[in-house]
Amino acid sequence: MKILVIGVGGVGGYLAYKLIKCNKDVTISATKKTIETIKKEGLKVIDVDKEEIVFPKTEIKGIYDLIFVTVKSYNIDNILPLIKNHSNENTRVVPILNGIGHFEKFENLNVKLLKACIYILSNKKDINVIHKKTPLFYLCVEDDEVVRKAFEGCDLKVKFSEDIKKDIWKKYLFISTFATLQSYYQKPTGWIMEQKRDEVEKFLDEVIKIAKEEGVDLSEEKEKVIKQALNIPYESKMSMQIDFEKGNKTEVENLTGYLAKKSDFINQYYLRLRNGVK
């Protein structure tokens, strides 16, 4: 089985590393500078308290059986030609991105699209260095025999979902809330929970209401999200906040803008974030 991982950030880099450790045939796609560095120095992964270096394949050729897409949502259009050139009707394409609205961009590809979401606290520490900060790894993906085969023998927690739409909304409930509030206040999870608990609950209520309008019942998820937020490291930051801090392009459209169209309460945060955090 040939596997292509597009994007070598906190998610894609870690996923490629684990699949290689499971003796899978993995090729990566990233920026020219990243590929050149990985060719020379390898892909280094700091997995909580363990460090390892792997050397994934970097020459993209032929048709792939399975393609994981882990780029930021604003880069999807740029990588669609790559997918088209290295896939066919039997290729499974699995976008593992934050948000809800990005899947439609893949629908015109002649592939089998499988929706997915992931829970992981992992960031790109350097151009070829991935730092996974906690043991958390939980991938939810539509059930499929090719994906099952890809993860055979791997010590990763993977759920082959029978209701992927709900699973994705569960993740979106958490990440949209904290990515938005963290970026708005430029503070980590712990501070948000200490100082802005009322806003957290209001934001969660708004997302739950929107999900219900789209046919997904998240009424039992609010307390789970709050508990999850209280249990992760105080200084944890969503990738969107990190991008704002670095002055990078952000996923505000995918994580906040989608909801802002449906909620005046969320729109107030979106308008400021869209114009840049001051």
Image: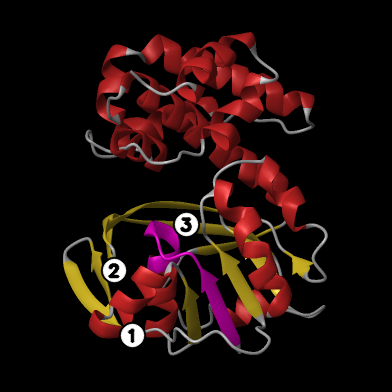
Numbered label attached to residue 138: 3
Q: Earlier in the sequence, mark 1 or mark 3?
A: 1
Q: Quadrant of the N terminus?
A: bottom right
Q: Within the magenta stretch, is there residue 10?
A: yes
Please determine whether, in this image, residue 70 is positioned above or below residue 264: below
Q: Quadrant of the C terminus?
A: top left
CA separation, marks 2 and 1?
A: 11 Å
CA separation, marks 3 and 2?
A: 23 Å
Residue 213: horizontal and vertical position, in percent? 78, 24
**Residue type marked 1:** Phe
Magenta residues, start to end: 2-13
Between residues 229 and 94, which one lies in front from this camera angle? 94
Q: Secondary structure at mark 1?
A: loop
The answer to whether mark 3 and mark 2 are in CB contact below 8 A is no
**Residue type marked 3:** Tyr
Q: Secondary structure at mark 2?
A: loop
Label 3 CA crowd tier, 10 Å (few <14, some 14–19, many 20+)? some
The answer to whether mark 1 and mark 3 are in CB contact below 8 A is no
Total numbered labels: 3
Residue at image point 78% right, 69% down: 112
Q: Within the magenta stretch, is there residue 94?
A: no
Residue tagged 1: 55
Residue tagged 2: 128
Residue at image point 62% right, 54% down: 76
CA separation, marks 1 and 3?
A: 24 Å
